[in-house]
Image (spheres, rainbow, N blue to C red):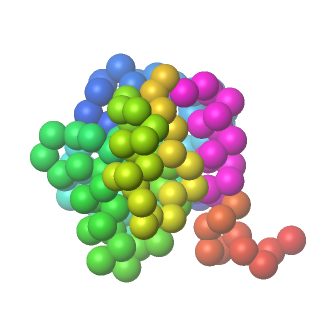
Amino acid sequence: MQVISVIDDDALVRSATIDLLDSAGLNCRAFASAEAYLSSGWAERTSCLVLDVSMPGLTGIELQRKLVQFGYTIPVIFITAFPKERLRAETAGFEAICCLLKPYSERELLGCIRRALAARPENLGSG
């Protein structure tokens, strides 16, 4: 089963994103912080991360670095409220599926998630 994990410290963004994903028939989990996600055990079950770049404590960028160090190859969709130039600079060197600026459209996010799920290693070469 494919699981989308949403990590954002903003409760309204988290809730709206989960509502959207639920309405699209996607299985998802929400986390208020990178630390909560890491301690949850969901990293090995996550098919796609929707990850806020700027959060208190461990940032989205720092979480992505840790996941790579731990050997996880989870497709990431970075989201941020900061200008695109800053987003590009902060996420340079990461192979993100998408980098979305808040507020993003539902269509944009769902399109990115479809691309992320199609890019999963277990989906490559099938068909």
| Numbered label tally | 0
Rendered position, 37 above or below 95: above
The location of residue 114, given as percent across then percent down, is 68, 49
Q: Is residue 124 found inside the magenta-colored segment of the image?
A: no
What residue occupies the far left of the structure in this picture? 57
Coordinates of residue 69 in the picture (x, y in percent): 30, 77
Quadrant containing the N terminus in the rendered view: bottom right
Along the line of sight, the residue nearer the viewer: 11 or 96: 96
Instruction: Please tell me which residue is depicted at 40% across the width and 33% down the height of the picture.
Output: 83
Residue 111 in picture, x, y percent from top left: 69, 41
Residue at left offset 29%, top offset 27%: 10
Q: Tell me where residue 64 sits by quadrant.
A: bottom left
User: Is 116 inside the magenta-drawn segment?
Assistant: yes
| Left/right of residue 119 with respect to residue 101 in the rendered view | right
Q: Is residue 115 left or right of residue 60?
A: right
Query: Which residue is pictured at 45% across the width and 27% down the height?
Result: 102
Q: Residue at x 65, y 65 (%)?
A: 119
16 left or right, relative to 57 = right
> Magenta segment, principal secondary structure?
helix
**Vertical arrangement, residue 19 with respect to residue 25, above or below:** above
In this rendering, does residue 33 appear at all? Answer: yes
Describe residue 21's horizontal placement relative to residue 33 as left or right: right
Farthest-out residue, front: 85
Q: Position of residue 9 (x, y in %)?
A: 26, 33
Q: Quadrant of the C terminus?
A: bottom right
Q: In this picture, which residue range is highlighted in magenta? A: 104-117
Q: Is residue 26 above or below residue 13?
A: below
Vertical comparison of 2 with 5: above or below: below
Note whether residue 29 is visible. no
